[in-house]
Image (cartoon, grey):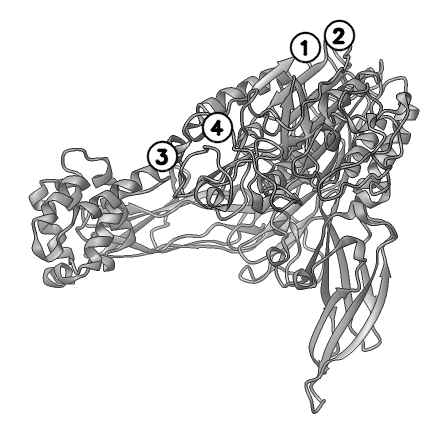
Amino acid sequence: MSESLERSARISQLKELQVKKLCEVLDKSSGRGWRKLGEIISNDRRFKVSSDDMEMCSLKVLELEGSPSLMLLRLMGERGCTAGHLMDYLKALGNSEALQCLKPPALQILIQPQPVALLCGHNLRLSCHAVGKSPLQYQWFKSKEEIPNSVSPDLVISPVQLKDAGFYICRVNSGDAFDFSQWAQVDVLNVATPCGQTYQSLDGRLKLVIQPQSQQLHVGETLQLECGAVARPIPRFQWHKNGAPIANGTKRKLVIPHVMQEHHGRYRCEISSSTERMWSSEVDVVVDDLYAIGGGSEELSPDQLYATDKVALLIGNLSYQNHPQLKAPMVDVYELTNLLRQLDFKVVSLLDLTESEMRNAVDEFLLLLHKGVYGLLYYAGHGYENYGNSFMVPVDAPNPYHSANCLCVQSILQLMQEKETGLNIFLLDMCRKRNIHDDSTRNVILKVTANIVFGYATCQDAEAFELSSSGFTNGVFVKFLKKRLLDNEKITVVLDRVAEDMGQFDATKGKQALEIRSSLSERRALTDPILPGDSVDLAHVHSRQWAKAHDLPESMCLDFDCGAQIKLGFAAEFSNVLVIYTHIVKKPDDMSFCQAHVTDLSQDLDVDPKEMNRETPEETGIYLLSSSLPQHCLYTRLSSLQKLREELVFTVCLQGTFAAMDDDHPIHWTKSVNIGKPLIARLDLHRAMRRNSCLQTCLMPHSPCHSPCHSPCHSPGPEHHLHLHLGPQQALDCNRLSPQHLYADICESFQGAAGGCGDSYYENAGRGHCQPALESGRFSSSPGRLSTPIEAGDDINEVQTVFINSLQLHPQ
């Protein structure tokens, strides 16, 4: 290409690599950078850059990976600036390094070698092709060693052996210039190919050739699981234990040295490429109990602390009926569930619970607690704190709500203490602002124990925030908690480190800080092993009950009279969220169209027909589990399974058209399917509160329990939440836990978190949910009720200035 043609090229025609290097140079230069370049261009009437344009460029500095130089170049390109003009400006700028970026490279690699996984004995071919201004010379390397006689664009090894596995790179010389290709990993699998089976083509589908094998180990031995597949490019691997992805389990071989009982479980590997995904077989890993003398290769050291069991209840409330909606609780609960299961916790994760459902879920949770158990309760949603007592707000709480409508954390702790638990952990991801509508005081008398840990997402009388953009993101607390949760450290040390991490986060610095309250006197950690205690029989009974919340229906194949076969599969996104998918296994040759969908679902689930049977998981609201689902199916997401009163019976409808038919009207075949009560539906949380365990607390002044005018109705109406009137021995816990998550949208036009009422406040300032009745009239269940102005701390405008990529703060 001639110099004149290069100069006439528009800036938009510059190669991406050239623009990237140029922007990096101009962004980091102070005296001869993008600001000075803008001043030079502003003197040229053809491409005048105004002060507003420069201000627009400067705003890019505030964005993550934002480049003011790139914005400036785009403005110049829109106004007709050519590469020649840009060269002249850079010469005037005196930035020779930036000018060098525009010179065409003497050598360009057009075809890069690709990573590949193949079988031992097959042929390996790696390719690297380049163009340059003089004759090209190639030299291949394996790691840092030259490969003899490998001086052509294609490296061929035939046949490939195990010793040939490794990383390869090619150096290309063109005169005085040279460049290296990208690294290409070669994975060689030693597999005996069954008679009659070949794996000749690597350009087609993934081919699974090594399956993991079940193992039985003693504590202290090394666990090794292997999974292998052939593909070009090399496939990706993700190991799962008990349905949860394993951190750092992204290699073909999973190696865990010094296994403990917590590594006992079911394992399988997910193998994926850019277009396909498949699963290995699921295998059992059994770790023998070596805590008894002579029971294994090692004994539990005298100073090793342990749990008799580990159980966790995770609740995320986001779809409130009378209060602003939240986003982060769904993501937070999902990710913490996967992490806790890796720590061998029995986890039940629930979304959007009413008051009665929350109380019944806590009842079931309490049944699993006995001497020495580690009990963990995580809550994300709206909440508040009065007189040192924390309250969690159910999704059906009225506006405004009181302690009688919510669950009190301290009352739950009191009941946990009666179980002689080994460790009680509360992680409360909610706001702790005072509720001015609740003037009741509690009289919860707690035992003096050295096993309690509170991790509050924010300080007393402060808000907790979530970060949200167009997609789904974590709340601030879990954003940092998930990076530390698997650390083998005392739980208070883990939370201390999370607090330090949160303190370095500019977006909420001075707005939200983790508060830790602990009476823990021993070095107890979430990673402690499990050693069943004396009450093992009772524990097993309760564990089997809790395990019902994880029971998925078995996948099934349905055969229709027309000759078509449908696979009906199930997956669990949460303990109360079921995914149903249908896949065409086979269809008659003369059938031109074939599709199967589910219909006639129970009215208890309140499923929108428009969101059923969609072609992608995301279309039906399955965002977190979508990567683990099979492709080319129709998907339906069933939430709120706790409301299911009867067995789940639905219809699978097959639609088909035949090529020989004159019209295009489909023919229908149907089959009725009964999958019983899946997941949490088996625990019947929808029932009226059955036990006294979560309800028995001290009587409270100003409580509905003391008022004879309250009728025995459990479900709240639009303005009041009524309770059964019980005697002194069965008084309701009227100060129930009600965390109301303060999430305030920090929009581009954010005006601060000052109080206000009416729609205009929410349109201009976002939503603050610190207190029960702080929402404006448009969120109130009673039209015309006055809203109380939101109590605000510092000016949140300064938070906006450090936000990146239009992230928004939402108080919980």
Element type at mark 3: helix
Amino acid bearing label 4: Ala
Q: Where is 603 relative to 593, above or below?
A: above
Tell me how far mark 3 sits from mark 4, CA to CA.
Answer: 18 Å
Residue 484 visible, this angle:
yes
Task: Tell which circle, 2 or 3, labels the residue nearer the N-terminal end.
Answer: 2
Q: Residue at x 81, y 58 (%)?
A: 602
Amino acid bearing label 2: Val
Q: Which residue is mark 2?
A: 448
Element type at mark 1: loop
Pick the front one: 81 or 123:
81
Q: Which residue is mark 1?
A: 519
Amino acid bearing label 1: Ser
Quarter of the figure with residue 393? top right
Element type at mark 2: loop
Please report contact status of discs 2 and 3: CB closer than 8 Å, yes or no: no
Tell me how far mark 4 sits from mark 1, CA to CA.
Answer: 32 Å
Amino acid bearing label 3: Thr
Q: Which residue is mark 4?
A: 792
- Residue 205 image offset from top left, x and y in percent: 59, 60
Tell me how far mark 2 sits from mark 4, CA to CA.
Answer: 36 Å
Tell me how far mark 2 sits from mark 1, CA to CA.
Answer: 9 Å
Q: Which residue is mark 3?
A: 801
Q: Residues within 10 Å of mark 2 (few under 14, many from 20)?
A: few
